Amino acid sequence: MATVPADTPLRSNRFPIPDRMRAWVLGDPEELSLVEKPVPQPGPAEVLVRVDAIAVCATDIEIIRHGVPAMIDGGLPFNRGFTPGHEYMGTIVKLGPTVDEFQIGDRVTVEVHAGCGRCQRCREGMYTSCLNYGFRAKGHRANGFSTDGGFAEYAVNSINTLAHIPDEMTDAEATLIVTAGTAMYGLDVMGGVIAGEGVVVIGPGPIGLMGVGVAKALGAQPVILTGTRDKRLDMGMRLGADAVVNVSREDPVDAVQRLTSGKGVHYVLECSGAPNALNEAARMVNRGGRICLAAFPGEPVPVDLAYLVRNNIYVFGIRGEGKSATHRAAALMAQKRFDAKLIHTHTFPLGEVPTAIRYARERIEDAIKVVVQIREH
Ligand SMILES: [Zn+2]
Ligand SMILES: [Zn+2]
């Protein structure tokens, strides 16, 4: 048998790879154009992913409009040939040199951040808080933020950002794993949900809804979801919430106290970004309780710090999906512990990315996750 030199990428005739591909690139703010680009080449510890489907995230809309939080070599991502999009899944079609952790043909979903792998935070597993964030020359990779993302036919991914998905999981559902991974990371940083403890999730956006599913799958009891829109709260019930509270009809703190017989809960996962959410969360947890902020208000807000200190309440903030939380979320979804595909609403083809983004923006009230299906099956 002929041996393949260790520095040669591996490909297969099963998946013919063109030299060039279609990809959306960001010009000026709000200006996306479909161009032809060379298909990127995977390096060591990387693979080439044929992108099969990608979800539109609120952060993509933010990046396309304002640039941040995407950052390339210390600057904004405009007019740099940058391809956005970070919530994608696909099929591995080429292996970088030395890669034996995955096979050609594997279906995978991706998490966003590979980090740089060399800074202290990356070494601690906090690669979403990489100290070299955005500096590609130092090895930082966060596809759709600092390196090319998935609104394209192909993308290169570090093997550390990949999770296998079962055959029976649809492409659209698989794009939601990274969202569930973010919710999972929030629960992780609070110390990990212990079965039987109460969790309140504030805000039924995609991360909040996935937070309900993950918390319930981990055995939390009760799981209470608060928000303003009945349609989304109803979805929360279908994802496993024990109770939902419409805050336009009932004070959420009173409701949580009522639902827990005045005891409060151990954990609050704050996913709304509402200005008073932290103050309300503080009154939902019991003494010594823990709050994780996964969303933030647009401007500084007053916080009752004395209440937090007097009651020994811990407050955490997360960015993204660190410590391989995406792998744990993928495992729960592969076991069908909650039905993530409930929150996916509408599908568009690759040629209609701007329409998909406009749809996601305009229908943000009830359309939760819009998916671009790049390849039909
Ligand atoms: Zn996202
Ligand atoms: Zn780093």
Image (cartoon, grey):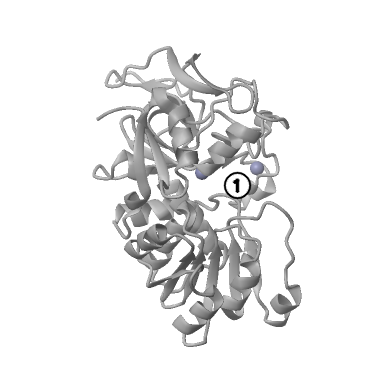
Please determine whether, in this image, residue 166 is positioned above or below residue 135.
below
| Residue at the (32%, 27%) spot, across then down | 375
Q: What amino acid is at disc 1?
A: Thr
Please determine whether, in this image, residue 183 is positioned above or below residue 279.
above
Please determine whether, in this image, residue 277 is positioned above or below residue 14.
below
The residue nearer to you, when weighing 268 against 165, is: 268
Crowd around label 1: few <14 · some 14–19 · many ≥20 (10 Å): many
User: Residue 73: x, y in percent?
Assistant: 70, 29
- 157 on left or right of 100: right
| Residue at the (73%, 61%) spot, across then down | 301
Dot 1 beta carbon under 8 Å from ligand 2: no
The answer, for residue 370, to whether it is visible in the render is: yes
The residue nearer to you, when weighing 273 against 117, is: 273
| Residue at the (65%, 55%) spot, across then down | 297
Residue lying furthest front? 249
| Residue at the (34%, 33%) spot, across then down | 103
The residue nearer to you, when weighing 359 against 293, is: 359
User: Which quarter shows the N terminus?
Assistant: top left
Query: What is the count of numbered marks?
Result: 1
- 169 on left or right of 17: left
User: Residue 100: x, y in percent?
Assistant: 40, 34
User: Residue 361: x, y in percent?
Assistant: 50, 40
Instruction: Identify the image quadrant of residue 278.
Output: bottom right
The answer, for residue 164, to whether it is visible in the render is: no
User: Which quarter shows the C terminus?
Assistant: top left
Query: According to the image, label 1 marks what residue?
Result: 128
Instruction: Identify the image quadrant of residue 211.
Output: bottom left
User: Residue 356: x, y in percent?
Assistant: 43, 33
- 302 on left or right of 1: right
